[in-house]
Structures are given as structure tokens and as C-alpha cells.
Image (spheres, rainbow, N blue to C red):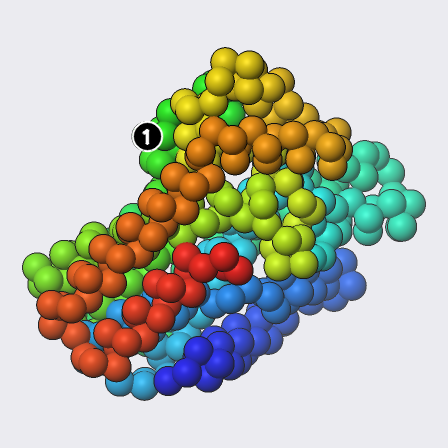
Amino acid sequence: MSMDTLRTEVDRSLGEFLDRQRPIVNGPDLAPLLNAARELLSGGKRLRPAFCYWGWRAAGGGDEPGIFVAAASLELLQASALVHDDVMDKSDLRRGMPSAHRRFQRLHEKSDWYGSAEQFGEGAAVLLGNLLLIWSGEMWRSSGLPNLEATQPFHDHMRTELMCGQYLDLLEQAHGENTFESALRVALYKSGKYSVEQPLRLGLTLAAGGGAPWIEELCVEYGNRVGIAFQLRDDILGVFGDPVETGKPAGDDLREGKRTMLIARTLAAATPEDAATVRRLLGDPDLDAEGVDKLRGVIEASGALDECEEMIARYLEESLASLDDAPITTEARSALADLAVAATSRKT
């Protein structure tokens, strides 16, 4: 199955699920919640459903309609995380559109309601994120696949990891200093595991109905490595990415003060003067284009950018090698190799 066909099935499943919510989230007062969910879910590369689907196929699963429903539910979890993340980071844009809290803030302003428009926007976005989280579990269960019970502990663990990762991200920024190891822990909990390793594990377990040793081995040797490389690429795009590709302003991670693996490497390798510049400018919400360029220059001069690129290449190579001996279908082996490349490419 091509990625375009899989994306179509995921989009269809999401659309049908949201249509079923209309009788509950109904009327002019609640419509903005459903509309915001639809718009947010209209974008994205569908990587998490793809890792789940090809995990399913790798372990012998067929094209049962339920697998598309189960895989698509991971987009609801992703959307929940994005909405909450944007509130915590005070991000204005997401996927080229106003972030959820800014969307609801503008609704308040245009309606000339009482109270703080900003506070209303943030509160509404938190509730939208919670709603999407609830829906992700509901949609997962509605897939009707036979081994849902066996996968439930992994599904629960994935959501707990994500919430812990969000907290660790806040904690990392509050501490003000970070090591590569601490940034890696945040990256894995907050993104890497629920983006690659856990969707893959869910798909494999749904098809196999149990935890065969090779499944865990593949999840770690392939899924974990791709997840780390995926997050390293995201770190780089957050600083050097094209806004047309990322859907966010250039250098937004620098304004938000993200304590990423890229920044950790920079602080460890930069000269004392350059490290002081990073500490002074990182997290400045008014950072202008000149400040962004200055920080980019420090990152490149420290060698951190090249080092992270080398790490991505190494993790990708190791993850692809792990597929060679895995007892999976030829079709799935090829698809998972393509997904690993897509997840770690310069346009992710």
C-alpha cells in the first residue's frame, strides 16, 4: 500500500469519527471545538499511523478496515499533544495556521466577550487538547480489532510517557541548563517513543497477539533509533527549517527557549563567549531575524549541527540494518525502510 493510499484511509477514518461526534459537540456554542479539531487534523504527514499500520502488516496482519481506524486514532493523540504544546510554548502558528489558543483568543476578541481573550483562548485550547486525548482512546477502542486487550497496556503506557515528556520539557526549560542526556530523555518521552517506537509496537502486537521476543527487539533496535533520529531532525528544523515546510516562523524554537539536543551539544562545544550568547538570547520571545541568525551562526561554529547530522545518519543506518534479520514480510521491510528515511529527512 502506498503512503498516499494509507493517508486517504486515515483521513477517511478520522472524518467518519468526527462526524459521529457531531450530535454531542453540537450547536453554535460547541461548533468551534469541532471545527478547530477538523482543521488541525487536516494536516500532518501521518507518520504515526504509518508506523502502526506497517507494524501490523509486518506481523502478518491484512487490510481489515479496523486497522485504519486504530492507526488513525494516533493522529488524535498527536493533535492533543500539539494543542497543549502550543499553549505551553505560547506558539502563534501550527501547520501554517493560527494555533488553537490563538484561534479561540480571536473568537473572544471578535465576539467582544467579557474578560481576558488570552485567558479564554488558553483555557479553550487546554479543553480541546483534553477532548482530543479522550477521543484518541475512544477511536482506538472502536476499531474492533481482536487483540485490543493485549495492546491496551502498551497504549496506556504510550499516553503516560507523552504526558511525562511534556512535564519534563517544562522542567528542562525551568532548570535553564541541560545536558545531551537530559535533552534526549525529554525527546524520547515527549516525541520519539510515541512517534515511532510505540505505534510500531502497537501494530505488531495487534497482529501477533502477544509479545514475541523479536517484536521487542525490533521496537528497540529499529523504533527507538528512528525515534531519536526523528527528534534530532525536528531539533534542526526548529532552528534552520524553512517556515513553508515547518508551518512555524523561522527560529521559533529559539524564541521558545527549547532545550533540545542540538542546543545541548552547542553549549557543550561552544566557546565560553558563544555559550554566553546562547544563554542570553535563547528564550527571548522578541528575538528578531538578526538574533536568530546570530544563534544559528554559533550553533554551526560549535560543530553541533554537523554532529547532529552525523548522529541522524548513524541512527538511520543502524535502524535499517536491524530490518535485515527481522522475521517480517518483504513488503513491510521495504515500507519500514522508506518510513525511516522519510521520518529523518530534511523536510520532515
Q: Is residue 121 left or right of residue 47?
A: right
Pick the front one: 237 or 272: 272
- Look at the image and tell me in which quarter the N terminus lies: bottom left
Residue at x-position 49% and y-position 77%: 7
Residue 169 appears in the picture as rendered: no
Q: Is residue 341 left or right of residue 95?
A: left
Q: Is residue 275 left or right of residue 104?
A: left
Pick the front one: 204 or 277: 277
Residue 271 appears in the picture as rendered: yes
Residue at x-position 67% and y-position 26%: 284
Determine the image quadrant of residue 117: top right
Above or below residue 126? Residue 37 is: below
Q: Position of residue 242 (x, y in %)?
A: 64, 53
**Amino acid type at mark 1:** Glu
Determine the image quadrant of residue 200: bottom left
Pick the front one: 292 or 15: 292
Q: Position of residue 44 (x, y in %)?
A: 55, 64
Pick the front one: 53 or 141: 53
Q: Secondary structure at mark 1?
A: helix
**Residue receiving disc 1:** 181
Above or below residue 309? Residue 272 is: above
Q: Position of residue 309 (x, y in %)?
A: 41, 46
Q: Position of residue 51 (x, y in %)?
A: 34, 66
For label 1, count other residues whose C-alpha is less than 10 Å away and answer few (under 14), some (14-19) or many (20+): few
Q: How many numbered discs sit on the rendered protein?
A: 1
Residue at x-position 35% and y-position 63%: 340
